[in-house]
Image (tube, rainbow, N blue to C red):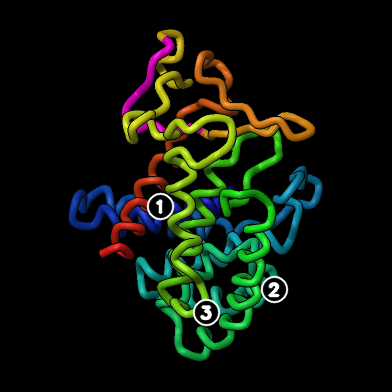
Amino acid sequence: MNYGTAISLAAASRALKDYNPELSKEALRVARFIWDDEHNRQANPEEQTYSGRFSNPEFMKSIECRAAFELWRSTDYEGYKTRMNELLPTLLEQFNRNASVIAQMIPFMDNAFKKQVRPLVEAYAGELVEVDKENPYGVRISTAGWAGNRNIVQACITNYLLHRSYPELINPEYIYRGLNYLYGCHPCHNLSFVSGVGAQPKKVAYGSNRADFSFIPGGVVPGIRILKPDFPENREDYPFLWSENEYVIDLAASYIYLVNAVNSLLK
């Protein structure tokens, strides 16, 4: 998970550069330290207790590649770019899993890379059409134990990034649907999942206010949870179901990004 921290800090260093130069430098220093520390450490097989995706070599290569990309963008150091290029084939082999980061990379790569990725985006666009058949809302609703607004928003952001590079392949409608869904076009009820936004916003949510049965403006909740076999639920009268009504900090940030993306397209 150190690579995940390096990704966040390297990206944050760019965002903070003019706003807080000292913090920007510190974020980049720590990101570079993490990279060097990870590459200088000798692995001890007896201490490898990872499970799930962290035991997947392809996943580990992909997250190292993402760290190399963010560090390269923040420093222009060719060593990071070289390592990123070495790991890129692993990302491309699992395009759907890595579509969001590949979409971010495309504007910074050469035309040869863009041509290489194009057939993968064509296949991805074909799969988006299949999503239309799953439900009337045109998004992939989670059927796991946690509601899926985060995945829906992230998928729409990925579609936006791919649309910027391949506008002829990705229909903007696959970007707008994320906001349509959040604002009330979903199962169970027609409330907006963004507190304080929309004609009928979410007013009972799980945040620091949960015992008050109230809401925090701007908070975004996980949304509709599918109870087996196929019953959609999002309680509006009980804030303690965090899998449906918990305010998620990074989801709020992603929502703001998606709103700006949609505004840029509509202009």
- Which comes before the other along the chain, label 1 or label 3? 1
Q: Nearer the viewer, residue 146 or 175?
A: 175
State how far apart marks 1 and 2 are (Cα).
27 Å
Residue at point 30%, 59% (across, down): 14
Q: Residues within 10 Å of mark 3 (few under 14, many from 20)?
A: few
Residue at point 55%, 54% (across, down): 3
**What residue did someone put label 3 on?**
82
Pinpoint residue 74: horizontal percent, then vertical percent: 35, 66
Q: Residues within 10 Å of mark 1 (few under 14, many from 20)?
A: many
State how far apart marks 3 and 2 are (Cα).
19 Å
3 vs 2, front mark: 2
Q: Residues within 10 Å of mark 2 (few under 14, many from 20)?
A: few
Question: Given the current orientation, which residue lies at the most extreme top position?
Answer: 212
What is the span of residues highlighted in magenta in the rendered image? 213-221
Residue at point 49%, 54% (across, down): 34
Pinpoint residue 250: horizontal percent, then vertical percent: 44, 41
* Amino acid of disc 3: Thr
Residue at point 58%, 52% (across, down): 139
**What residue did someone put label 2 on?**
93
* Amino acid of disc 2: Glu
214 within the magenta span: yes
State whether the magenta stretch is mostly helix, strand or loop: loop
Q: Nearer the viewer, residue 203 or 34?
A: 203
Pinpoint residue 102: horizontal percent, then vertical percent: 53, 70
**What residue did someone put label 1 on?**
9
Q: Is residue 231 left or right of residue 10?
A: right
Q: Nearer the viewer, residue 46 or 260?
A: 260
